[in-house]
Image (cartoon, helix red, strand yellow):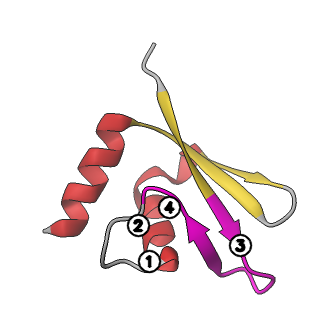
Amino acid sequence: MTDKILIHVRFNNDGTVSEISERPAGLSPQEWFTKLTEKAGSAFQALTGGRGLFRVTADEIAALKAAVLQ
């Protein structure tokens, strides 16, 4: 079993992203959320209180960050 990394997301009242972990420099929280949703949307879990999280592997995170930096 591969360990998963949790990427925590916090939303504003209007649904935009205010905070998100593992964000590459140069991307806004909303841009990083959009990239993650496009590539790993099935790994997202909505939580109460304007929060959510992605459960992804370290390799998936590295690949996503590398694609963003190109």
Q: Secondary structure at mark 3?
A: strand
Q: Residue furthest top?
A: 1
Q: Residue under label 4, please give it.
A: 37
For disc 1, the marked residue is 31
Residue under pointer 3: 11
Q: Provide residue 60's location: percent of width, then percent of height.
A: 34, 42
Left or right of 13, for residue 44: left
Closer to the eye: label 4 or 3: 3
Q: CA distance from mark 3 to mark 2?
A: 16 Å
Q: Earlier in the sequence, mark 1 or mark 4?
A: 1
Q: Give the mark, 3 or 2, whose residue is nearer the N terminus.
A: 3
Residue placed at 45% from the left, 60% from the top? 36
- Residue 22 against residue 61 in the figure, above or below: below
Label for residue 42?
A: none
Image check: 26 left or right of 38? left
Residue at 86%, 62% in the rendered image = 49
Which quadrant would the C terminus be assigned to in this image? bottom left
Q: As shown in the figure, which amino acid type bears the numbered disc 4?
A: Thr
Query: What x and y, as percent, mark residue 16?
Result: 65, 81
Look at mark 2 in the image and give the residue it sits on: 35
Q: Is residue 45 above or below residue 56?
A: below
**Is 1 rendered above or below residue 3?**
above
- The residue mark sitting in front, 1 or 4, is 1
Discs 2, 1 touching: Cβ within 8 Å: yes
Residue range corresponding to the magenta coloring: 9-22
The kind of residue tagged 2 is Lys
| Other-residue count near label 1 (Cα within 10 Å), few / some / many at <14 / 14–19 / ≥20 | few
Residue at (60%, 70%) from the top-left corner? Answer: 19
